[in-house]
Amino acid sequence: MLGAVEECDNGNYKLAVQHWMISAKMGDEDSLNEIKDMFKEGHATKAQYATALLGYRDATEEMKSPQREEANRLGV
């Protein structure tokens, strides 16, 4: 995240989006939101945002399990 923020601050939007794409596809919601913001500002394409959304969804689906659901229910 630090590298992406620095890239964005330096105007290297393409590289920043690439960093955020990787972490969004790993299930990082903050990175997904950064890509959404970059899309709104015109620094990311609709296709990049769609790819990030699908990757994020797939990653979060893979992390689901009955044990995690129970832990969340119990507030652990």
Image (tube, rainbow, N blue to C red):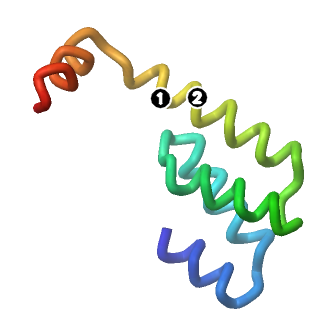
Pointers 1 and 2 in contact (CB under 8 A)? yes
In the drawing, does residue 45 fall left or right of residue 34? Answer: right
Compared to residue 52, the image places residue 1 above or below, namely below
Kindly identify the residue that appears in the image at 88 percent across and 66 percent down.
42
Query: Residue 10 falls in which quadrant of the image?
Result: bottom right
Kindly identify the residue that appears in the image at 69 percent across and 42 percent down.
52
- The residue closer to the viewer here, 20 or 35, is 35
Q: Amino acid at mark 2?
A: Arg
In the drawing, does residue 37 fall left or right of residue 40? Answer: left
Query: Residue 50 falls in which quadrant of the image?
Result: top right
Image x and y of residue 67, in percent: 20, 14
Which mark, residue 14? none
Q: Which residue is mark 1?
A: 60
Compared to residue 41, the image places residue 56 above or below, namely above
Compared to residue 56, the image places residue 70 above or below, namely above
Image x and y of residue 24, in percent: 58, 47
In the drawing, does residue 42 fall left or right of residue 29? Answer: right
Q: Amino acid at mark 1?
A: Thr
User: Residue most toward the top?
Assistant: 66
Image x and y of residue 56, in percent: 58, 36
Q: Which residue is mark 2?
A: 57
